[in-house]
Amino acid sequence: MRMTALLLFSAAACSLAIAQTSGPEVSFCPAGTGSDGFIDWSKLPKNPPRQGPAFIPVSGVNNLSVGLLIYGQLPDPIQTVYTVVNPATLQIPFGAGPVALFFSRPIRGISATLQTAGHGGRHFDVLAYSSNEDAIAGYPEAHVSIAGADYPTDQYSTSPLEVRSTAANLTEVDLRFLTDGIGEYGYYNLVNIRIDSGAVPDPANQVPRSGLKEWLRADRVNITSGPVVALGNVISWPDQSGNGSDAVPPNPSLSPVSFKDGSHCKPVVSFNGGQRLGFNLPVNGWTGMTVFMASQAYADASSSGTNQALLWNQTATGVATFFTPSQTHTYFRFGTTQTNNQPVYTRPFNIGGDFSVTTAIHNGSTDSLYVNGLLVLQQGGKFSSIAGASASATIGAGLSNTSFTGNIGEILVYDRVLNRQEQETVEHYLMSKYGVE
């Protein structure tokens, strides 16, 4: 127990009315956990225990229970410390809290929505503790200024929160609601608490490993601590292929930033036109190569020779190997020393900053491009072997001192051509993960 001044109450149910309408306050990320469990508040005892947490099973997950403990001092000693509105909604009187959730075994993550009826300054956050007593801050840490009445008192304002550990080692999660003054607040609600127990296999486990030479996942980055909106600057982007070819910035000043974006609120590595990362992966001599990329472009590329998202620079003129999923076009090239080898796909419309999944394939004499799982371009007559490429690749820095501006969620590089089933498996994994339709 990491907090003091514990006080639990049992009395008549709180008589505060529940607001009848609801609406989003700010478009925060609602969830990124692979939830398999749910906290059913109706399983709580009618009156909370006077000492210690009230334990209930987590619905949907075997052999996992959660203990509820509410801290704080209520202004009215006859108020109950909580009211179960429905199985998904628990009402907490203002003044009670934070709310601590203790799990019978470590979990991977949790997502929650906190609701209030009222306006004025307020602050929601979530803090999780690992089995090693380490604290992990949730995202986002939501704050609304006291300036102005942002929502009327009869309308909910909401703030979805989430915290996730890749080590699946969270044992306690604390949810807090603070305000600059009681104002019109009488209560807040905990709504739709979803649990990622860590028992569900990572969807990435289905990714084929044979021939996988580089795998960069934005949910597996080493970062510095950063501000609320940004998770932090990237120190290194560890290679998940097992080959140990981590992507690192040439110096800290060129480090990109990691934060969450997209309809599924997944971590991305963000490049604003100056940052870059590099990794070592020689590709010369390959006759088969497959590159997958999940990305967003926030600026259009002017031509096939600029603004590359992923680049193996050239050791001779015109033989760079690169991949540039831009807003209006997708440019790519498997450099083989062949002249006039510049495949270009023109999108049917400008996709703006939407996520897309790009698959580029070099299969001997044939190059192919798939966008969001669909074959959009295929060219034959290519030289078979990649040649003239540097031994190292760059992410975010293109030819002619140009840069990629946008976000990258994932990069996979194979030294072979995947069969169609394997390719579709990777594409489905990426499209599902990043919300690509």
Image (cartoon, rainbow, N blue to C red):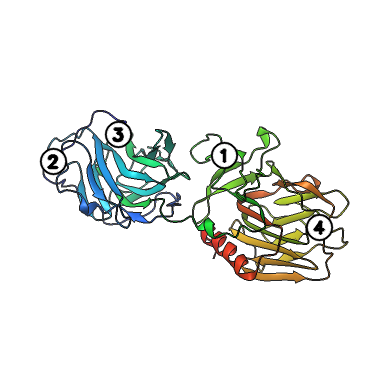
The kind of secondary structure element at disc 1 is strand
In the displayed structure, 86 sits above or below 219; it is below
Foreground: 300 or 87? 87
Is residue 283 something one can see in this rendering? yes
The kind of secondary structure element at disc 3 is loop
Q: CA distance from mark 4 to mark 3?
A: 66 Å
Q: CA distance from mark 3 to mark 2?
A: 25 Å
Observer-side mark, 4 or 2, equals 4
Foreground: 154 or 124? 124
Disc 4 marks a residue whose amino acid type is: Ile
Q: Give the labeled residue for mark 2.
A: 10
Disc 1 marks a residue whose amino acid type is: Asn
Q: Which mark is residue 388?
A: none
Q: Give the labeled residue for mark 1.
A: 222
Position in image of residue 421 (x %, y %): 60, 69
Picture residue at 52% right of the left edge, 61% below the top = 432
Observer-side mark, 3 or 1, equals 1
Position in image of residue 256 (x %, y %): 63, 41
**Left or right: 92, with 426 as reference point:** left
